[in-house]
Image (cartoon, rainbow, N blue to C red):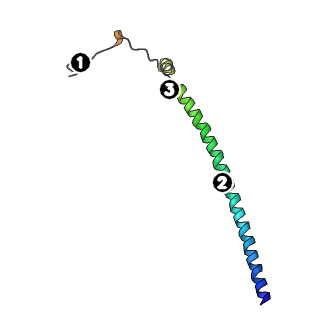
Amino acid sequence: MHTRFNIFLAFVLIFCAIYVIDVQYRARHLFIELERAQNLTRQYELEWTQLKLDQSTFGKHARIEAVAQKEIQMMRLTPDRTQYLSAEASK
């Protein structure tokens, strides 16, 4: 009976050791996954900051006007260049 108890304790000890190894293995994988997620978060935050900066730069009225004049040769609207249409003329 004493021998059975010792064998039982040995099995419990082996089971606990295997369980500890498994838990450590899972913890390492979760830590690696956490590190990857944090790196990805930092990368996205950096990209978001850059996009906000680009938006504020490209959205300025003076830049839009300069690009419109340079690239598609748009000109400012003046009263002498304005054409008015009436409903009668379109029929």
Q: Mark 2 points at which residue?
A: 33
Answer few, some or many: residues within 10 Å of disc 1's Cα (few below 14, many 20 plus, some between 14 and 19).
few
User: Which residue in the structure is indicated by mark 3?
Assistant: 59
Determine the residue positioned at 70% across, 65% down: 23
In space, the residues marked 1 and 3 are separated at their CA atoms by: 35 Å
Q: Is mark 1 on a helix, strand or loop?
A: loop
Give the x, y percent position of residue 17: 75, 71
**Between 29 and 63, which is closer to the camera in this rendering?**
29
Give the Cα distance between marks 2 and 3. 38 Å
Counting labels gives 3
Residue 41 shown left or right of residue 66 in the figure? right
Is disc 3 placed on a helix, strand or loop? loop
Above or below, comparing residue 52 to residue 13 in the picture:
above
**Circles 2 and 1: CB atoms closer than 8 Å:** no
Residue 24 sits above or below residue 70 on the image: below
Instruction: Classify mark 3: residues with Cα within 10 Å, few (<14), some (14-19) or many (20+).
Output: few
**Amino acid marked by disc 1:** Ser
Q: Mark 2 and mark 1: span between their CA atoms?
A: 67 Å
The first of marks 2 and 3 along the sequence is: 2
Residue 65's disc is: none
Q: Nearer the viewer, mark 1 or mark 3?
A: 3
